[in-house]
Amino acid sequence: MATDERYVLDASVIAKFLMREEGWDDVARLLRRGLLLGQVYTLDLAFKEVANVLWKCHMRGLLRAETVKGLLDELSKLPIEKHPQTWELLSRALQLSIGARLPVYDMLYIALAEELGAVLVTSDAKQHEIAVRVLGRAILI
C-alpha cells in the first residue's frame, strides 16, 4: 500500500476490529498506517451500524451488557474522521445502488471513498466487487 493513501472504513471492518474477529489484526495494521497520516475516514452512519451489531450480539447471548458497553466506549475513542451523509453522497449512493442492486447503506461508503479519492476497506465481498469496479481498487478484509 502506498504511504499517502486515504482509507474509508465501512461498518463491517470497524466491527471486525472491535470484536477481534478473524482479520482484525489486518484492520489494526491499516489503522496504524492510516492514522499516522490522519487519513482514515468513515461515515457517521458507521457508528450507528456498529452499535446495532453490538446490540444484536448481546440479544443473541454472544456478548454481555458490560462487554457491549466497553466496546462502545472503545468505538467512541477510535481516531477516525467521521463524515456526515450529504445530499450529494446520498444521490451518488442511490445511483450506485440502482446499478449494483445493493443497499444504499453500502453504496454510501463507496460514494464517500469516491469523493475523497480514497480506498474502500470492507469485509463485504459484494460491496468490495462494486467498489473495485467504481473506484478501481478496494481492500477486502
Image (spheres, rainbow, N blue to C red):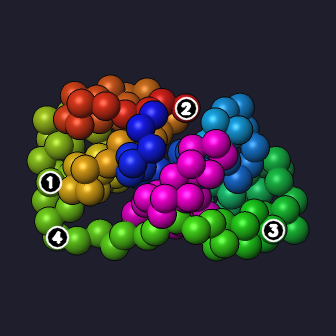
C-beta proximity under 8 Å, tags 2 and 1:
no
Quarter occupied by residue 102: top left
Magenta segment's dominant SS is helix
Mark 3 or mark 2, earlier in chain: 3
Residues shaded magenta = 28-51
Residue 92 in the image: state x and y as whole percent.
15, 54
Q: Which residue is mark 2?
A: 141
Residue 53's image quarter? bottom right
> Dot 1 corresponds to which residue?
92
The residue at the point 62 percent across, 66 percent down is 78
Name the amino acid type tagged 3: Gly
Q: Nearer the viewer, residue 8 or 92?
A: 8
Badge 2 marks a residue whose secondary structure is loop
Which-is-in-front pick, marks 2 and 1? 2
Classify mark 4: helix, strand or loop.
helix
Q: Which numbered disc, 4 or 2, marks the residue closer to the eye?
A: 2
Q: CA distance from mark 2 to mark 1?
A: 25 Å
- Residue 45 drawn in magenta: yes
Residue at 32% over, 48% down: 118
In the drawing, does residue 44 fall left or right of residue 101? right
Which secondary structure, mark 1?
A: helix
- Per the rendering, the mark at residue 70 is 3
* Residue on which disc 4 sits: 87
Q: Earlier in the sequence, mark 4 or mark 2?
A: 4
Q: Please give left or right for residue 42 compared with residue 117 in the image.
A: right
Label 3 Cα neighbours within 10 Å, binned few <14 / some 14-19 / many ≥20: few
Q: Earlier in the sequence, mark 2 or mark 1?
A: 1
